[in-house]
Image: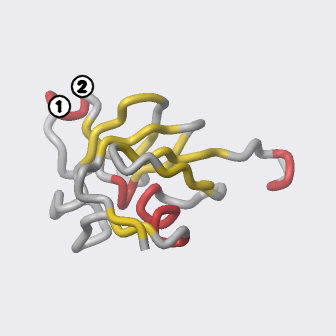
Amino acid sequence: MNPEDVPARTLRIQPLGLTLPVAQGQSLLEAARAAGVKLPSLCRNGSCRECIARVLAGSVRHRIEWPGLSADEKAGGWILPCVALAEGDVTLWQPQARAG
């Protein structure tokens, strides 16, 4: 499949209320940063949990097999945006997000 054939994805960040584009292969943290939105982060490799957020709608997969989340957290919709890839449009709950 050609990159231009991949449907565009969006990331909506709540409660900030912003909707951002997500490029193919871009993590949710990378997409936010590219759009000038600041999400909490430190390690950017899925181990420190600083960026932990909850998916309200949509689905993601992680770049690494088992990021720093418990099975209960994963089942509850918690993700690590630094290593999370959108599988479609995603709505994320991250009250510490800041525009600009």
Quickly name the residue at label 2. Answer: 75
Say what amino acid the circle numbered 1 marks. Answer: Ala
Residue type at tag 2:
Ala
Q: What residue sits 38% from the left and 57% below the top?
A: 83
Q: Quadrant of residue 97?
A: bottom left
The colour scheme of the drawn protein is: secondary structure
Q: Quadrant of the C terminus?
A: bottom left
The picture places residue 34, in percent across and down from the top left corner, at: 54, 72
Mark 1 — residue?
Answer: 71
Q: Secondary structure at mark 1?
A: helix
Reply above or below: 93 against 63: above
Q: Residue at x 52, y 62 (%)?
A: 31
Q: Marks 1/2: CA distance?
A: 6 Å
From the viewer's perspective, is residue 89 above or below residue 81?
above
- Who is closer to the viewer here, 96 or 45? 96
Density class for disc 1 (Cα within 10 Å; few <14, some 14-19, many ≥20) is: few
Q: Please identify, in this view, whether the residue under mark 1 or under mark 2 is nearer the observer.
A: 2
Across and down, in percent, residue 9 comes to 64, 45
